[in-house]
Image (cartoon, helix red, strand yellow):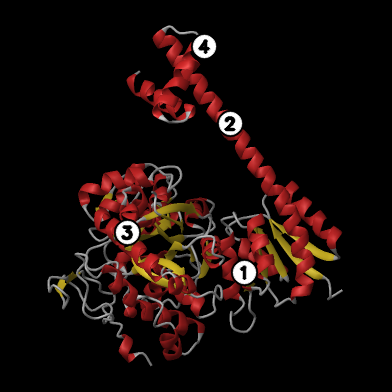
Amino acid sequence: MTDRLSIVVVEPDRDRAELIAASLDHAGDYNIHIVAESSRVARTIAEYNPDVVLIDVASPSRDALEELALASGPMDRPVAMFVDQSDDGLTKAAIEAGLSAYVVNGLRADRLKPVLDAAITRFHMFQSMRKELEATKKALEERKLIDRAKGILMKARGLDEDAAYALLRKTAMDQGRKVVDVAQALVTTAGLLS
Amino acid sequence: MNGIDLNIGFMALVDSAPVIVAQELGFAKQEGLNLTLEKAPSWSTLRDMLALGRIEAAHMLAPVPIATSMGLSSGIKFDALSVLSVNGTVIGVSTDLAQRMRDSGYTFDFTDAENAGRALIAAATGKLRLGVPFPFSMHAELLYYWLNALGLPAPQSVEIHTVPPALMAEAIANGDIDAFCVGEPWGSIAVNNGVGELLIPGAAIWGFAPEKVLAARHDWVESEPELSKRLIRAVWRAGRWLDQPENHMTASEILARPQYVNVPAEVIDRALSGQIVINGRGEERHRDDFVVFHRGAAGFPWASQSAWIASQLASRLGLDRKTVGSSTRMIFRSDLYRAALAGLAADLPSASSKVEGLLDSRTPVSSESGKLYLEPGAFFDRRFFDPETVD
């Protein structure tokens, strides 16, 4: 019983948190707690007294975890930052996957590895999903901007849609800029003039 | 030819300006450098990015390189190549607490740290809950120094919460903290959101406090001394540009961009111009030295600044101050800074260490050209810190 690793996952998104917990369960027999982010996060974690804390690298709440190092007396009970672990490859892999881990009780590397391997795999999936979402969002925003610029040109110059787009594209090529940048400039200028 | 690419990390704060301006205004290019600026979500992530070599240098809290060399925070050795900014933080309180302070006659002069501190301690209803952005920060050091000097043992007798700068306004709005010390623009954002009022600038506690440094991995600096020097020069020129009042508006516009600080330029301009709006009624206070990037040899990484930080950390953690002092002596790289700026119009002090807190007015000091003035830099309680007499 005392041998079961206690892991705290700091994650505000309930669904995502449960996916991480499920991956960890699959990897071994762990005691997993999920903690949402808040300005009290450090105190909540301290109450669970975990062996390992897993948190998204991009989470601003990470800084609150640094408090744990001080709260527990940095000299006698080190909260090793994951980045301090000797296995540099594993550390890099985790950070690249968007994961940071805090080892609270000086855990041995061989017990930590399966936890991290499972978490890293899961985080990789999240990261590619996040990238896809961002790319989609950006494409949509660019589409909207170009549509607005086309609309402005159609109205101001009496062009049809194809001709308006052709004009945008030609201007972009002439100036060595992206169509979306030309559209942005046009929309901003039109906004100032109207 | 775009020059040599360097990745530089920063946090969304007004005092990240030197690294941003170095790239945006071509000071980096002048040194044959092309800086890719990476915004970090938290100080710990920024430190890790630097430690793992994803970035070559970073806009970093001055105490972090000292704490890491003491094995606190992370075991990686960082050097501070220069001081990026002096001062630039504010202490603010919740609107409730501000009202209680006002009711008992406090006038929010934004100047007198002693009065402000006594009023704050008197108005507290329980253990004060204070927000700081990072455990190893000048914010924490200034708060502790201030409260201890006023007879409130800190951090023991207060509750410290670590809150990332951009979330400080939210933490005070949620009632999680009563007061905070944070870098601009985040104190002003709390004022704008109607959740906080500003008490004093950090400069009221220590008049010339090293706030952020240009940090790099020690082994990178050792293997790339020439690149390090070029970076020091680019950032030094950016600081000189930033200290000119006529450039404040342009600087605010640049920093306001989404990829940088991402708050309205008007709010950023408050810190740069020292014209601070302290409450929701729009009352303003002026402070010339609110944030300093250049004058008074602001960029010079004084050994005595590093010694002050080391001494504060050591005494709080019960470590031997002398041992810590000597092991951290070479972190603030005044040697490299001198070498980098040799031949430029930079006027550098002859000494690399001074008694901190000694000057209460602009004072000429010995320098290469003999024209260097240091800015006033007293501690509010008139104590001095002499690194030679640490025991």
Measure the C-alpha gap from mark 2 to mark 1. 35 Å
Seen in the picture, residue B155 relative to B92 is either above or below; the reply is below
Measure the C-alpha gap from mark 4 to mark 1. 55 Å
Residue where numbered disc 1 is placed: A83
Residue where numbered disc 3 is placed: B234
Q: Secondary structure at mark 1?
A: helix
Measured from the top left, where is residue B254 in percent x and y?
A: 35, 44
The crowd level at tag 3 (other Cα within 10 Å; few <14, some 14-19, many 20+) is many
Measured from the top left, where is residue B104 in percent x and y?
A: 34, 61
Going 71% across and 53% down the picture, which residue do you hit?
A123
Measure the C-alpha gap from mark 2 to mark 3. 36 Å
**Mark toward the viewer: 4 or 1:** 4
Seen in the picture, residue A130 relative to B376 is either above or below; the reply is above
Asked whether the residues under the numbered discs 2 and 4 touch, taking CB atoms below 8 Å apart as contact, a structural biologist would say no
Residue where numbered disc 4 is placed: A161
| Residue B217 visible here | yes
Q: Secondary structure at mark 2?
A: helix
Q: Secondary structure at mark 4?
A: helix
